[in-house]
């Protein structure tokens, strides 16, 4: 079994990727299905998760993103089934919609280790209309990098695969997004494969406080991203946290260090959270340096609920 687990993680770690990143979300750990389908059914309840992100606040046509995840777990077949939809509006002329159904099989390796394998499949729709660009400098019209053609609207099949290992105090995960794509297929409307790895802990500091540190790493082609996250929970009712995302891409002219602050509360089966992103370094003086996220989630308890499993967040 150890060799089997090691082989799976090695395969996910060893492939190169291409093109721009998927959505970058500050509150991803509360529902990871859109990033890793193996998280489908990680709670015994029916889970509904909604997140909205507004970037570069104060600028016209600023990027806006949204995620909707819906999951359910069926104990008799040890399987989670879900649905995920993400929307990314990059501005006035470019939009992406990603809709997929997700499935995960849960396997108890022993009394304290739960492993899940997940696969999601659906469509990736990209819309681009260069004619809607507004050029502030007339000379930009002569640049060959700009597209002056007709609008594009393409729908492509899309698949993700992932694995997750959960224990009472730790959680490890790895996934690859856009499995059907490769470097040769990448175009304006088709992203390349993206690889994600993460580890999260959960430690009790006292009877009322829990501490949850986490590390996330994402790689696609020459683009890398890392996030260091630290969350504090008070009686699992209130939480607050801090995330630092450094610049790992060696860009001398555009440093992109970011910090995220988030707060939230949970009451019975309801969750609400808010995250604020602040750019540091050179990025603080370009365009806009802030972004906001609002997260809402609701769980519907089932009569067959046997209680939460490991690291259900």
Image (spheres, rainbow, N blue to C red):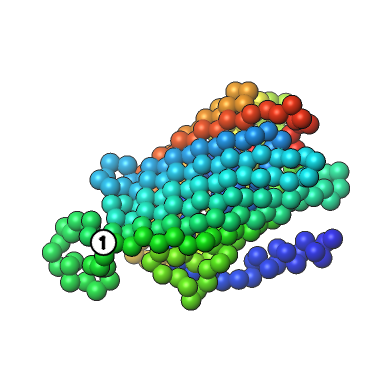
Q: Residue furthest top?
A: 268
Task: Decide which of 96, 77 is in the foreground and name it.
Answer: 77
- Residue 55 spot, x, y in % from top left: 37, 45
Residue 264 visible somewhere in the drawing: no
Q: Residue furthest bottom?
A: 184
Task: Decide which of 267, 185 is in the foreground and name it.
Answer: 185
- Quadrant of the frame with the N terminus: bottom right
Q: Quadrant of residue 254?
A: bottom left
Task: Decide which of 41, 263 is in the foreground and name it.
Answer: 41
- Quadrant of the frame with the C terminus: top right
Which residue lies under the disc numbered 1?
Answer: 130
Q: Is residue 73 left or right of residue 269?
A: right
Q: Is residue 257 left or right of residue 10?
A: left
Q: Is residue 164 left or right of residue 151?
A: right
Q: Is residue 86 left or right of residue 145?
A: right
The image shows residue 268, relative to residue 307, as above or below, that is above
Q: Which residue shows up at 69% across the image and 37% down it?
A: 43
Q: Residues within 10 Å of mark 1 (few under 14, many from 20)?
A: some
- Residue 236 spot, x, y in % from top left: 64, 28
**Tag count:** 1
Residue 109 visible somewhere in the drawing: yes
Q: Residue furthest left?
A: 138
Q: Which residue shows up at 50% across the image and 56% down it?
A: 123
Q: Quadrant of residue 311?
A: top right
- Residue 198 spot, x, y in % from top left: 63, 53
- Residue 200 spot, x, y in % from top left: 66, 47
Q: Which residue shows up at 58% across the image and 56% down it?
A: 121
Q: Secondary structure at mark 1?
A: helix
The image shows residue 265, relative to residue 120, as above or below, that is above
Q: Which residue shows up at 29% across the image and 62% down it?
A: 151
């Amino acid at each position: 079994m150890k060799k089997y687990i090691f082989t799976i993680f090695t395969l996910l770690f060893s492939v190169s990727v291409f093109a721009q990143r998927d959505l970058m979300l500050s509150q991803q750990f509360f529902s990871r299905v859109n990033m890793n389908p193996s998280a489908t059914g990680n709670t015994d309840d029916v889970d509904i998760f909604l997140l909205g992100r507004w970037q570069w606040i104060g600028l016209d046509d600023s990027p806006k993103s949204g995620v909707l995840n819906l999951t359910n777990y069926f104990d008799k077949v040890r399987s989670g089934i879900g649905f995920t939809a993400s929307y990314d509006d990059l501005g006035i002329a470019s939009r992406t919609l990603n809709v997929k159904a997700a499935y995960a099989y849960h396997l108890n390796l022993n009394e304290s280790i739960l492993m899940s394998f997940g696969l999601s499949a659906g469509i990736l729709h990209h819309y681009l209309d260069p004619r809607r660009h507004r050029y502030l400098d007339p000379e930009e019209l002569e640049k060959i990098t700009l597209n002056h053609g007709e609008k594009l609207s393409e729908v492509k099949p899309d698949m993700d695969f992932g694995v997750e290992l959960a224990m009472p105090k730790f959680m490890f995960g790895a996934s690859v997004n856009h499995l059907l794509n490769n470097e040769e297929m990448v175009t304006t409307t088709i992203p390349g494969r993206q690889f994600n790895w993460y580890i999260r802990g959960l430690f009790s500091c006292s009877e009322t406080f829990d501490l949850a540190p986490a590390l996330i790493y994402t790689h696609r082609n020459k683009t890398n991203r890392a996030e260091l996250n630290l969350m504090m929970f008070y009686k699992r009712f209130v939480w607050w946290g801090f995330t630092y995302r450094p610049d790992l891409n060696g860009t001398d002219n555009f440093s992109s260090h970011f910090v995220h602050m988030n707060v939230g509360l949970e009451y019975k089966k309801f969750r609400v959270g808010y995250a604020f992103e602040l750019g540091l370094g050179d990025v603080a003086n370009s365009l806009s340096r802030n972004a906001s996220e609002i997260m809402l989630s609701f769980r519907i308890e089932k009569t067959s609920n046997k209680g939460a499993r490991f690291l259900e967040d």
